[in-house]
Image (cartoon, grey):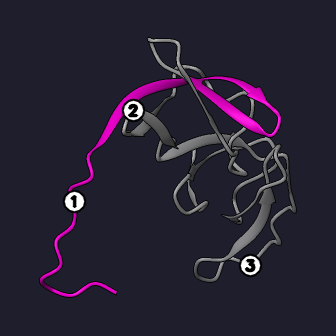
Amino acid sequence: MFKADDKMDQVILDKKDCTYSYFADPMYVCMDATTTSTKSKPRTWVTPELPRRRHARRRFYDGKAISVELPTSVVREITWTEPAVKGDTSGKVLKPAKIATGFEVPVPLFVSQGDKVEIDTRTGEYRKRV
């Protein structure tokens, strides 16, 4: 437990942009211009097809990579969802839907199988249909 007058060393984290490189089960490997790599445990909405143009950001402490930040949102195709029930339009009604990784995200009734949706990577929630 810390006291109000306790002093702490300042921690400086460096950040570098990187791109997804390849999948090395069960890790995703990201690389930067210096060709160093960082392995990161996958999140359920990240797929091996994560476009290379979508940059991630690595954090370093004392010269060692400690984490990878993904973009705040990703676009994924709905691989399964039930059809909407006609007449069920009251309020913010959501139904379950799955993407290729098996990750389940609640989506509005108008979203159908095959639609592409934007998912917030921080919360795993539906943002919009694209």
| Residue 33 higher or lower than 41, as above or below | above
Q: Is residue 120 magenta?
A: no
Residue at position x 47%, y 25% from top?
Answer: 18
Q: Quick one: quadrant of the C terminus?
A: top right
Residue at position x 68%, y 50% from top?
Answer: 43
Counting from the top left corner in percent of width and height, residue 71 is at 48, 41
Q: Can you tell which mark lies on residue 20? A: none
Magenta-highlighted residues = 1-30
Extreme-top residue of the structure: 34
- Dot 3 corresponds to which residue? 88
Q: Nearer the viewer, residue 71 or 89?
A: 71
- Classify residue 96 as left or right of residue 127: right
Report if residue 130 is visible in the image.
no
Q: Residues within 10 Å of mark 2 (few under 14, many from 20)?
A: few
Q: Quadrant of residue 123?
A: bottom right
Which mark sits nearer the N-terminus, 3 or 2?
2
Three-letter residue code for mark 1: Asp
Q: What whole-number distance in Å separates the C-alpha atoms at marks 2 and 1?
A: 17 Å
Q: What whole-number distance in Å separates the C-alpha atoms at marks 3 and 2?
A: 55 Å
Three-letter residue code for mark 3: Asp
Q: Residues within 10 Å of mark 1 (few under 14, many from 20)?
A: few
Counting from the top left corner in percent of width and height, residue 116 is at 67, 41
Counting from the top left corner in percent of width and height, residue 67 is at 50, 44
Extreme-left residue of the structure: 5
- Dot 2 corresponds to which residue? 63
- Dot 1 corresponds to which residue? 9
| Residue 1 higher or lower than 65, as above or below | below
Helix, strand or loop at mark 2 = loop
Three-letter residue code for mark 2: Gly
- Classify residue 66 as left or right of residue 97: left
